[in-house]
Amino acid sequence: MTHNLALSLTLFGGLLLMAVWLDDMAARIRVPGILLVLVLGLLIDNNLSALPGDSPPLLSLANAEQISQLALVLVLFFGGLTTNWREMRLVVRPAVRLATLGSLLTAALVTAYILGLQSLPFSAVPVSLAVALFIGAMVCSTDASATLGLLRPLVGRLPQRLIDLLECESALNDPMAVVLAGLALALAAGDAGQGSEVVVEVMRQFLLGVFLGFIGGKAATLLLSSQRSQSYGRLGAIVSLALLMVVAGGSNLVGASGLLAAYLMGLVLGNDPQVDRPLLEESHAGFAKLAELVLFLCLGLVVEPNDVVNDLFWALLLLIGMVLSRWVVVELLLLRSGFQWPQRLFTTLAGLRGAVPVAIAIQAAASPVAWGQMMPPLALAVVLLGLMTQGLSLVPVARWLGLAQDTPAAP
């Protein structure tokens, strides 16, 4: 083992232990765990200047991009695995509308909002359509773990249909954000005259990813059915993880969206009655949590705190545009869905951002586009502001709107 490898293992192991401790402490003091993990990453000197000798950076941008893509595969797979269509059948239609059409409309409104900011007198930096579209795609998806984690004090006291809507939407809208961000990066890398070709290529990746994810889910179902899984025993989680690696990696090799394929594979596998779904969820929950913690550690390490401070003003403007855009979209798509205005308003405010914008921002920074380096500090500033403003106000807002019952509802 080389000195640099031993040093990296020691430091990353210590950082992960600290991240787990911070996440546990955050649950006790009722603040988002990812907020504390982000701050931890920012406080660590990635250049290791305090250590003796000529030590390389703890984490390079290229390595952070590779790690974030792998982590996003685990997060999306777990999101699909935990989406139960039978339990959420009452909210499937509005949740699908919010996750698909709602994500598209949110990205479009945020894109228009960003382009409109250029007319302000203090906006001296020109923003292209590709940049605005990428930012809109980066922030159009919501994070279920952040939202539901903050609502722990109200477990059993909020309407179950509202909780199911937030959880189902958050599980379904991540692939849409990934595809839209890929479209923006492709438009930025190509010529203006190749826009139609880029759109066709992205649609091909989308459809092929759906197909390969479905095939991979069915293959995993055959291997992990109740009868066959008895022969694997505790190795079932390793078998499913190996199949996930094959599907995600193979999809990228043939030009499909590996992230979308991972999500569809989890969705098909988790909703097959022949599979022991609770066992798989329990096995992969640790992988997904590890991936989420690593994502935020990576972003905190490769971003300079000064850059985050400098982007706070623009992040605040972007957060305002995000909330207004989501409010318009939620009111439009849930108007006749049986959700009253307090529930629609709460759904608007519960649209917290989490792991997906982090991974998308790191992907842009590692790409050849000129503006990619600006995305990680902006994403980090937006996530931090959203968690501190929207996130910490969720419980008081739920009580103010009369959504929280005095006593827990009967199961």
Image: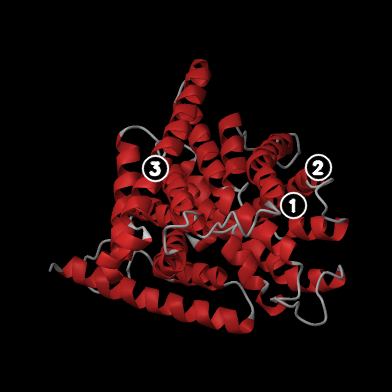
Q: Which residue is mark 1?
A: 323
- The span from disc 1 to disc 3 (Cα, nearest Å) is 30 Å
Whole-angstrom CA distance, mark 1 to mark 2, is 14 Å
Residue 327, percent from left and from top: 78, 49
Tag of residue 117? none
CB within 8 Å, label 3 to label 2? no
- Quick check: 348 above or below 14? above
Badge 3 amino acid: Gly
* Residue 254 picture location, percent across and down: 32, 33
Q: Earlier in the sequence, mark 1 or mark 3?
A: 3
Q: Is residue 229 left or right of residue 27?
A: left
Closer to us: 86 or 358: 86
- Taking depth in this image into account, of 205 and 383 the one nearest to the observer is 205
Which of the two marks, 1 or 2, is nearer to us in this view?
A: 2
Numbered disc 3: secondary structure: helix
The C terminus - image quarter:
bottom right
* Image color mode: secondary structure
Looking at the rendered structure, the secondary structure element under dot 1 is helix
Q: Residue at the spot x=32%, y=69% of the render?
A: 49
Q: Position of residue 364 (x, y in %)?
A: 46, 43
Q: Which mark is residue 258?
A: 3
Q: Within 10 angstroms of label 3, few (less than 14), some, or many (20 or more) residues?
A: many
Q: Which residue is mark 2?
A: 332
Residue at image coords 75%, 55%: 348
Q: Residues within 10 Å of mark 2 (few under 14, many from 20)?
A: few
Residue sitting at x 73%, y 35%:
116
Give the image location of residue 60, x and y in percent: 33, 55
Residue 18 showing in the rendered view: yes
Q: Dividing the image into 4 quarters, which one contains the N terminus?
A: bottom left
